[in-house]
Amino acid sequence: MMVLLDASSSIGRRNFAKVRGFISSIARKFNVGKDGLQMALATYNRKVRDLWDFNQHSTKADLLKAIENIEYTGGGTATGRAISYAAKRKFEIKKGIFLFNNQCIWYRLKN
């Protein structure tokens, strides 16, 4: 699963924390690791910041701690840049892309 998380001023600090909590709740529902959930995550404002890649977190506890430590950055929003970033990495994405921003949650699941 590839997660793109809006960390710009348009989402705001409070909503950012809510979305981060939602991402944690998703991670809690799955086994994490080689045969389970593998999550890559990037935040974006005007720039995309790649925080971690697939297979970087091999336990649920490690993944949840990483999610908890994601920082809100504020600044302008470049959602298109984040989507382009994910599109360039599509060969690595096996199941889906999830984009969380101030207007919607967007996802695309692959067969």
Image (spheres, rainbow, N blue to C red):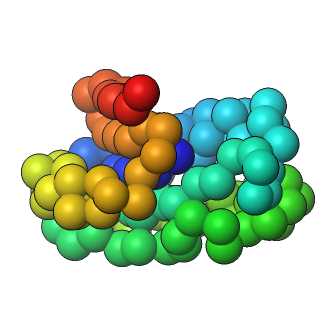
- For image coordinates 62% across by 34% down, the residue present is 22
Viewer-nearest residue: 58 or 103: 58
- List x then y, in percent, for residue 12: 38, 47
Viewer-nearest residue: 90 or 56: 90
Q: Is residue 76 left or right of residue 109?
A: left
Q: Is residue 24 left or right of residue 28?
A: left
Q: What quarter of the picture does the C terminus occupy?
A: top left
- For image coordinates 75% across by 58% down, the residue present is 34
Q: Is residue 46 visible from the viewing direction of this image?
A: yes
- List x then y, in percent, for residue 1: 52, 46
Query: For residue 43, what is the image quadrant?
Result: bottom left
Query: For residue 9, what is the image quadrant?
Result: bottom left
Q: Is residue 57 left or right of residue 1?
A: right
- List x then y, in percent, for residue 16: 48, 46
Tally of numbered tags: 0
Query: For residue 102, what is the image quadrant?
Result: top left
Q: Is residue 19 above or below residue 91?
A: above
Q: Is residue 105 above or below residue 37?
A: above
- For image coordinates 64% across by 54% down, the residue present is 38
Q: Is residue 109 left or right of residue 14?
A: left
Q: Is residue 82 visible from the viewing direction of this image?
A: no
Q: Which residue is at the far front?
A: 111
- For image coordinates 52% across by 60% down, the residue present is 40
Q: Is residue 68 above or below residue 12?
A: below
- List x then y, in percent, for residue 39: 59, 54
